[in-house]
Image (cartoon, grey):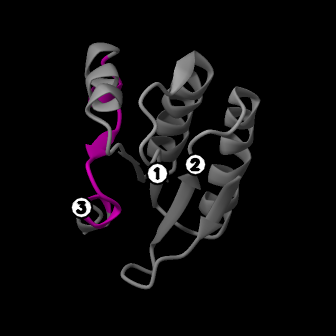
Amino acid sequence: MILVRQPAADRQAAAVAVVPHVPRGSAAGLAGRIEVALALGRRHVVVDLGDLADPGVPLLAQLRRAAVRVRAQGGQLSVVCRHPAARRLLRLTLLSESLAVARTREEALRGCA
């Protein structure tokens, strides 16, 4: 399940939550959700991976494309990774240079100021 919602803390942010333990094919829906957020005028998009330890190649590729798309619109993509292995993977693949990595959603939303 992937949802888009507008956090009360920041009206210019859109949170895109990727609920863990979904089929890997669900990563494809991420691009559409980010497009919706951008169309709604959001410039800071937060993708919450929850406790997911291994996001997998399809999701990593979607995150890379999403970071480029959001940046092209003048925004920023943040990824919430509570699991240390997922954060390490984002660093090893250098994705952490294209998007902000946070441990909590609150931390990610603070970064949009």
The crowding category of the residue bearing disc 2, from other C-alpha atoms within 10 Å (few below 14, some 14 to 19, many at least 20), is: many
How far apart marks 3 and 1 lie (CA) works out to 11 Å
Q: In this view, does 15 lie to the left or right of 39?
A: left
Residue, disc 2? 18
Q: How many marks?
A: 3
Q: Earlier in the sequence, mark 3 or mark 1?
A: 1
How far apart marks 1 and 2 lie (CA) works out to 6 Å
Q: Give the range drawn in magenta.
A: 94-108
Q: Give percent across and percent down for residue 43.
A: 46, 61
Under tag 3, what secondary structure?
helix
Q: Give percent across and percent down for residue 36.
A: 70, 59
Q: Give percent across and percent down for residue 37.
A: 62, 62
Residue, disc 3? 107
Q: Is residue 33 left or right of residue 104?
A: right
Task: Find residue 79 and report its image quarter.
Answer: top left
Q: In this view, does 64 lie to the left or right of 35?
A: left
Residue, disc 1? 48
Q: Which amino acid does label 3 sit on?
A: Glu
